Amino acid sequence: NDDDVSISTIGLTEGNTYYISVAPYSASRAGSFTLCLSDVKDYDYYEAAEDVTSLLGNCSANEAYTTIGATADKDKASCWVISGNQINRWFKFVAPTTGFVQSTIKIDGSEGTQRNTNTAIWDSNGTTEIACNSYTSSADNVIVGSDGLTPGNTYYISVAPYSSSSDGTFTLC
């Protein structure tokens, strides 16, 4: 078919040799392809989470972010409803002096195409869950917040759809 396929990995050792193997589903699907490689991490990974501290009190541009092409990274939050392999995106922020942050993932109308959204706030290690929320219906905006964050500390937000068939764009507030 005409689908792009992507794989990614982190933690490779510099200087070591690694191999990539590509094979069609069957001989009848054999053909040419283009192979693209990148050494730049993006917000698909906790380690390269996009800093959204500047969004405190504001929203990103409509449909600024996407889970299309996302891969699984770290654990899913305890309240998430996920089918199959988890795919997610990562953001980070520095807690304000109030110690309160509320994150809204907007997916309705011009704000995004993603459906069945899950989101969580994590401590600085990306594995200690602070708060989470999951969709009630497929087109819900999903809000998660936490009071009592330590001002000046860095926290993380992850966003994941129910499955790759629900992936799409979203606005982050």
Image (tube, rainbow, N blue to C red):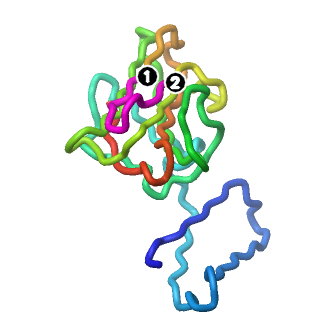
Q: Earlier in the sequence, mark 1 or mark 2?
A: 2
CA distance separating discs 1 and 2: 6 Å
Residue 52 drawn at (x, y percent): 40, 34
- Placement of 143 over or under 51, stated as above or below: above
Pick the front one: 80 or 149: 80
Q: Quadrant of residue 165?
A: bottom left
* Residue sitting at the far left: 110
Q: Which residues are magenta?
A: 132-144
The residue depicted at 43 percent of the width and 37 percent of the height is 117
x and y, in percent, of residue 19 in the image: 73, 76
Judged from the image, the secondary structure of the residue bearing numbered disc 2 is strand
**Kind of residue at disc 2:** Cys
Quadrant that contains the C terminus? top left
Q: Is residue 141 magenta?
A: yes
Taking 139 as reference, is 168 above or below it?
below
Going by the image, does 20 lie left or right of 173?
A: right
Residue drawn at (29%, 22%), measured in percent from left and top?
57
Q: Which residue is mark 1?
A: 144
| Residue under the image location 55 percent in, 40 percent down | 82
Q: Is residue 55 left or right of residue 11?
A: left
Dot 1, crowdedness within 10 Å: few (<14), some or many (≥20)?
some
Q: Is residue 145 magenta?
A: no
Q: Which residue is tagged 2?
A: 132
Look at the numbered disc 1 and give the secondary structure of its residue. strand
Number of numbered discs: 2
Q: Are marks 1 and 2 in contact (CB under 8 Å)?
A: yes
